[in-house]
Image (cartoon, helix red, strand yellow):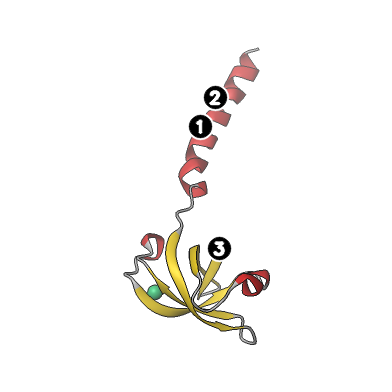
Amino acid sequence: MRKFSKFATLSVVSLALAGPALAVEYTKGQITKVDAKQQKLTIKHGALKNLDMPAMTMVFKVADEAMLTKAKEGKNIEFVADRVKGKLTVVEMK
Ligand SMILES: [Cu+2]
């Protein structure tokens, strides 16, 4: 019983630590160009807090090819961007 409660306490602590990292923040943007060949999207985006970036229009790689089939020029999206292998990449999109 003693062992169990110690384990339970550790679990609660690790969940609490994992919490903020899981809370992804979506940023609004508008797709201005789709480059299926290069697997890139040009997005006019709002401020990206995790990348410390102000609002601008720029090119992103996409983490998943399937995103390109959903992408259309002029489409308003909400997305998460991150640095993947040194390249700014769209990792989530809705
Ligand atoms: Cu940017």
Q: Residue furthest top?
A: 1
Mark 1 nearby-residue class (10 Å; few <14, some 14–19, many ≥20): few
Residue 25 — which label? Answer: none
Judged from the image, the secondary structure of the residue bearing numbered disc 1 is: helix
Name the residue located 52 percent from the left edge and 47 percent from the top edge: 22
> Which residue position holds label 3?
93
Asked if ligand 1 lies within 8 A of label 3, the reply is no
**Residue 18 point in image, percent of width and height:** 52, 42
- Amino acid identity at mark 1: Val
- Amino acid identity at mark 2: Thr
- Amino acid identity at mark 3: Met
Q: Earlier in the sequence, mark 1 or mark 3?
A: 1
How far apart in space, not on screen, are marks 2 and 3 (Cα)?
Answer: 35 Å
**Residue 43 point in image, percent of width and height:** 46, 76
Contact, mark 2 vs mark 1 (Cβ under 8 Å): yes
Q: Which one is nearer the viewer's eye here, 40 or 51? A: 40
Residue 68 location, quadrant: bottom right
How far apart in space, not on screen, are marks 2 and 1 (Cα)?
Answer: 6 Å
Name the residue located 34 percent from the left edge and 69 percent from the top edge: 53
Closer to the observer: label 2 or label 3? Answer: 3
> Which residue position holds label 1?
13
Residue 9 — which label? Answer: 2
Ligand 1 image-quadrant field: bottom left
Q: Residue furthest left?
A: 54
**Residue 82 point in image, percent of width and height:** 49, 66
